[in-house]
């Protein structure tokens, strides 16, 4: 399992022109799930995401997590994060969970 985390002031996801998810200030998380991943790993990932201190405190130091700022989280499935790129110039996705 891999996650790409981005701090955002707002974010939304559109499918066929319709907004299907949106948040204000918080975290946009792209998640690539692999076949070997299980619920225990998912829970560990959630706990890490919730605890990452990527928001600034009053002194400007990144010292606050998403809960501290009462932020929101938007999770987007992104199978390309599970790409195998070790050999050749074409990515393989055989380990990505469908």
Image (spheres, rainbow, N blue to C red):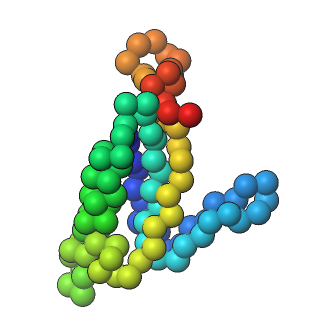
Name which residue lies at 50% across and 58% down: 75
Question: Residue 30 appears at what percent x and percent y?
Answer: 47, 51
Question: Residue 57 appears at what percent x and percent y?
Answer: 24, 82
Image: 57 above or below 86: below
Of all residues, the one furthest to the right in this rendering is 17
Name which residue lies at 38% across and 82% down: 70
**Number of callouts in the render?**
0
Whether residue 54 sits left or right of residue 92 in the image: it is: left
Of all residues, the one furthest to the front in this rendering is 39
Name the quarter where the C terminus is drawn.
Answer: top right
Residue 31 in view here: yes
Quarter residue 84 falls in: top left
Of all residues, the one furthest to the top in this rendering is 88
Name which residue lies at 49% across and 16% down: 89
Image: 6 above or below 25: above
Image: 87 above or below 47: above
Quarter residue 19 falls in: bottom right
Whether residue 44 sits left or right of residue 73 in the image: it is: left
Whether residue 22 sits left or right of residue 46 in the image: it is: right
Question: Residue 80 appears at what percent x and percent y?
Answer: 51, 35
Image: 43 above or below 10: above
Name which residue lies at 46% across and 67% down: 73
Residue 45 in view here: no
Question: Residue 5 appears at what percent x and percent y?
Answer: 39, 56
Whether residue 12 sits left or right of residue 71 in the image: it is: right
Name the quarter where the N terminus is drawn.
Answer: top left
Which one is nearer the viewer's eye here, 8 or 60? 8
């Amino acid at each position: 399992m891999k996650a790409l985390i981005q701090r955002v002031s707002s974010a939304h996801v559109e499918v066929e022109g319709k907004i299907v998810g949106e948040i204000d200030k918080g975290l946009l998380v792209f998640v690539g799930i692999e076949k070997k991943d299980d619920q225990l790993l998912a829970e560990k990932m959630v706990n890490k995401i919730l605890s990452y201190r990527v928001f600034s405190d009053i002194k400007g130091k990144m010292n606050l997590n998403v809960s501290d700022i009462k932020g929101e989280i938007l999770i987007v499935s992104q199978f390309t994060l599970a790409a195998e790129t070790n050999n050749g110039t074409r990515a393989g996705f055989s380990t990505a969970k469908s």
